[in-house]
Amino acid sequence: MSPQNPESIRRKDLACYLQRPFVRDSLTTADCMFLVIVALFPSAGYGIYMYGRLAAYVIGISVGTAIVCELVMSLVLFRKVTVLDYSCVVTGFMLGLILPPNVPFLYPVIGSAAAILLGKMAFGGLGRNFVNPAAAGKITVVILYRLVLGARFGDEYLTYSPLTLVERGGILDLRELLLGNVPGCIGTGSVVTIAIGAVFLVLTNVIDLTVPLSVLGSFSVFYFLLGSHGLNAYYLVLQLCAGGLLFEAFFMATDYTTSPMSRRGKIWYGIIIGVLTGILRKLGVMETSALLALLAANLLSRLIDRRTMPAAFGARARIRRTTVHGTATTRARKREREEKRNTEQDARFEAFEKQAATQGRIGGSETAGTVSEKALELQKSRRPVVRRTPDPELLSGLPAFEELEEQKAFEEAKKRRMEQLSGKKPQE
Amino acid sequence: MARLNFKGGVHPYEGRDLSRRKAIETLVPEQGEMVFPLLQHKGNPAVPVVEIGDYVRTGQLIAQADGECSANLHSSVSGQVLAIGKRETADGSLQESIVIGNDGMYEEVTRRDDRSLADPSRRKLLQIIRDAGIVGMGGAGLPTYYKYADANPRKIDTVIANGVECEPYSTSDYRRILEEPWKLINGIYVALKLFPGARGYIAVTENNNEAYRMLRGLLRDDPRIYVKKVRAKYPIGSERQLIYALTGRQLNAKMLPYEIGCMVNNIDTLISINQAVVCREPLITRILTVSGDGAAHPGNFRVRIGMTYRDVLEQSGGLRGKLTEEDVLILDGGPMTGSPLKSLDVPVTKLSSSIVCLRKRRIVFQPETPCTRCGRCLSVCPENLAPMQLYKDAMAGNKPAFVEHMGLECCGCGCCSYACPSKISLSDTISRTKVSIRGNVQLSGDYGRRIVRS
C-alpha cells in the first residue's frame, strides 16, 4: 500500500470520528474554569483597590503556589500536565480571595499547597476530591495559626469586622456593607462584585442557582426562627452579607466536584450548609462559620448523592387498563377553542396554503419504472467520490505510461456506460 | 405535567437549511449489482424464495417473512438473481443478502388488482401491510404488521404520526409533508381505521411553521386528526419522549406503547402504508437526505433500496470541491445517532435515513479530561438517568449495578455525550454495555420484551 502521510493516519483514528455523537457542545472543562476566573476578577479587583498591594501579593502567591504544586504533583503522580485545565488557578485564586490581606506570606503558600496537595491530588486529581480545595486550604491555615501562634485567626482585623461589631452591639450602615467598605477578607467583602460575578456565571450556564438559593434561603429561615433578632430584615441582611457567606454560597458551594449532581441533592446540600452556618453563628463562631459548614456538608455530599439519585423517567409507569368506548368523534368538541385562536393567524399563510391544492393526490406511485429525464441527467452529471488524493511521491515513482493507461481505461469504461444509458431509453 | 415538552434534551446545530428547500428528486441506480440484505428489520431475517438465475421483476417478492416478527422483502429492480450470500452492509457486518443484477428495464410484476371501492376490513388491511413488507422507517425497523397485530383495537386511543425529525441535517420528512401531505393523511386514516376508537396526532416541531400551517389547513374540518407543535429539542422524536409530550403518559423501557394506549409511527411508515393500501405497492423506495458541509449539493432523494451509498452520493453531486473520502466523515444517519460508513459500497436498506458528510477538518478534536461531576449529563438526560454513574459502572464492568441504576432505560440519544464538558464518551460506552447486557436474559429480564436490533 502507498505510504500515507502521518497526518491522515492520525486524523483517521481520532475518537471524534469513531464514536457517536459526532457533534459536541463546544464548552469544555477548561472553558468553565476560565469563566469562573473571569467572574472572580471583580471581587479581586475591588479587594486590591481596597487593600492595596498586599492583597495583590497574597492572591499572586496563592495562585503561583497552586500552579507549581499542581505541575509538580501531576507529573509525579500521573505523568501528564494538567495545569492547562485551569482548575489549580481557580483554587489558588479563590483561596487568595478568602484570606485576609495582612496575613504573613507564608500562610498563602502553606494554604495553597495544602489545598492542591491534600485537597485535590491526594484523592486522585480533578473530580476525585470530596472536600473543596480552597476551603481545605483555608482551614489548614486557620488550624496552623491556632497551633503555631496560639491566637485566633485574623484577630487583629476581626475586632472591626461587621459580625463582631454587631455582636457587641454596634450599628453598621448597610450601604457600607453592600459596597464592601468594611474590614474582612480580600474578596468576600463587597456584595456588588460578588453579584456581578454570580450573574455572569449564571448567564454563561456555568453554575445554576439551586445551591446558592438553597444556602441563603435555609440560612434566612433558620435565622428568622432561631436567631437572636427575630424577623428583623436589617439583621438578616447583615448576617447574609458578612462573614463570606455570599462568596461561599455562589462560588465555593457550587463547585462541581464537591456538590451533589442531582437537583434534589443540591437542595439538601444547600440546606445543610445554611442550617449549619446558622447554628455555628449562634454558638459564637463568627468568621469561620460558613467555612466549617461547607466542609461538613462536603463530607456528606457523596452520601447525599447516593441517596438522591433521580428516578428514571417512566419508572413508575403502569399499563393502562382503560378501554376505549365509542369513536373519537364524540370527543372532538373540545377543539373549537383552539380553532378560534388559530383563525386570526391564517391570513399570514394564505399564499402557502394555496399550494396545497396541487398536492391533493393520494395515490401517486413511488415505484414506477419509467426513467425520467431528470434522473438521467443526474446520472450523467455524477461526480465520482475518490478514496484519497493520489500520493504525489508514489506517482512520481511509477512510470508515466502506467498512469496514463489506467486513466484511459477508466475513460473508456465511463464512455461505454454513458452510451448504454442513453441508448436504453425505455419504451413509453 | 409537561405539555408538548419533556425534561432534558439538548439543542445541537440543526443543519436543516442545507437541504430543506430542495424538492425530492428521484435517483435511478446505475446498472450493476443491487444488494438486498435479508435482515432490514428487527426480528428474524427473511427467507429467500428465489433461486440463483431466476429473473425477477420490480416489486416481486424475493424473500418471505419468517414468523411473526419478520418482514417480506421485494426487489426494487428487474434482473437476474446473481447470488445469495454474505455481503457487507452499512454497519460493517457481513449479512446474508440476495444480489440482483440490474438490467435497467424496471419491468414491474403484474399483480392481480383486488382493490375495490369498498373499504377493506381490518383483517384485509393487516394482510396488505404484511404483504408489502412495511417496517418502521424511522430507523427502528420493527415490522409494522407485528406492531399492529399485537395491539388490541379497544385499548388504543392515540395514533401518533411522528413528523418531528429531530436528527440534525435530516429533512426528508419535512419535504414529504410539504410535497405529498395527502399521502400522509390517508396513511393516518388507514391507521385510524385499524383503531376505530383512536384520535390521531401529527407532531411537528415548533419551528416547522410551513408544515404546521399546511397540515392544519388540510385538516381543519377533520374531527379525528390533530396537528400539534412540540418543542424543537433534540430527542423529541424519540418514542417515549414524544408520547409524553403529546399525551402526558409515561413509558419505561420494559413497556411497549400499545400498553398505554398509544401507537407511534414515523410519517414515512404511514406513507408506505398508504402506498400499499391504495396502489398495492411494496416497500422498495426510500427518501434519503444527503447533507453536511462536505456534500456538494445537499438535497433529498428518492432512492431504491439496494443501491449503493456511493451511487447515491455520486449522483447527488458527490463531495464538495476537491474533498476525497478520507477528508470527510461520511455518516449513515445523522451526527447524533448515526454511524460512520467504513465503505461506500454498501447497500441502502429500508432503514437508511440520511447520508451526512462532515469535513474532518471542521470537526474539532477535544481530548477527554477527567469527569468533574458537574451534573450536566443528568440535567440533559431525557430519561432522567445519571449517565456518569452508568459510565462508571460500565467501565468497572459491573453489570448488575448498571441494571440497578436503570441503565437499560437509556434511549441512546447521545445527549449526555453532547453536553459533557470533559468530552467523555458517555453515550457510546453506555450503549455498548446495554447491548452486551441484553443478551443476558437473567440480567435484563423484562427489558427484553422490546425487541431491538443492535
Image: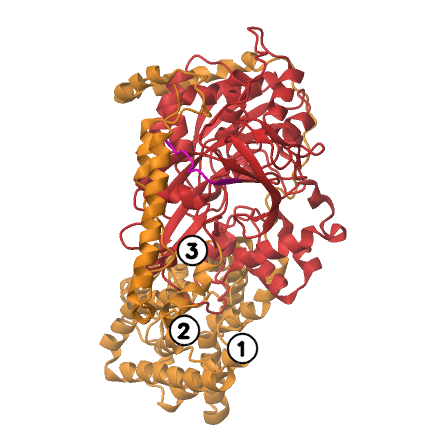
Chain colours: A orange, B red
For label 2, the crowd category at 10 Å Cα-Cα, with few meaning under 14, some 14 to 19 and many 20 or more, is many
> For residue A124, which numbered disc appears in the image?
1
Image position of B122 (left or right of B233): right
User: What is the chain identity of the residue bearing mark 1?
Assistant: A
Mark 1: amino acid = Gly
Which segment did they paint magenta? B24-34
Q: Nearer the viewer, residue A225 or A383?
A: A383
- Rounded to the nearest angstrom, the CA distance separating label 2 from label 1 is 14 Å
The image quadrant that residue A320 belongs to is top right
Q: Quadrant of the N terminus of chain A?
A: bottom left
Disc 3: host chain = A
In magenta stretch: residue B30: yes
Mark 3 lies on residue: A209
Specify which label sits upstream in the sequence, 1 or 3.
1
Q: Residues within 10 Å of mark 1 (few under 14, many from 20)?
A: some
Magenta part, dominant SS:
loop
Q: Please tell me if label 3 and label 2 are on a single chain.
A: yes
Residue B243 visible in image: no
Disc 2 marks a residue whose amino acid type is: Ser
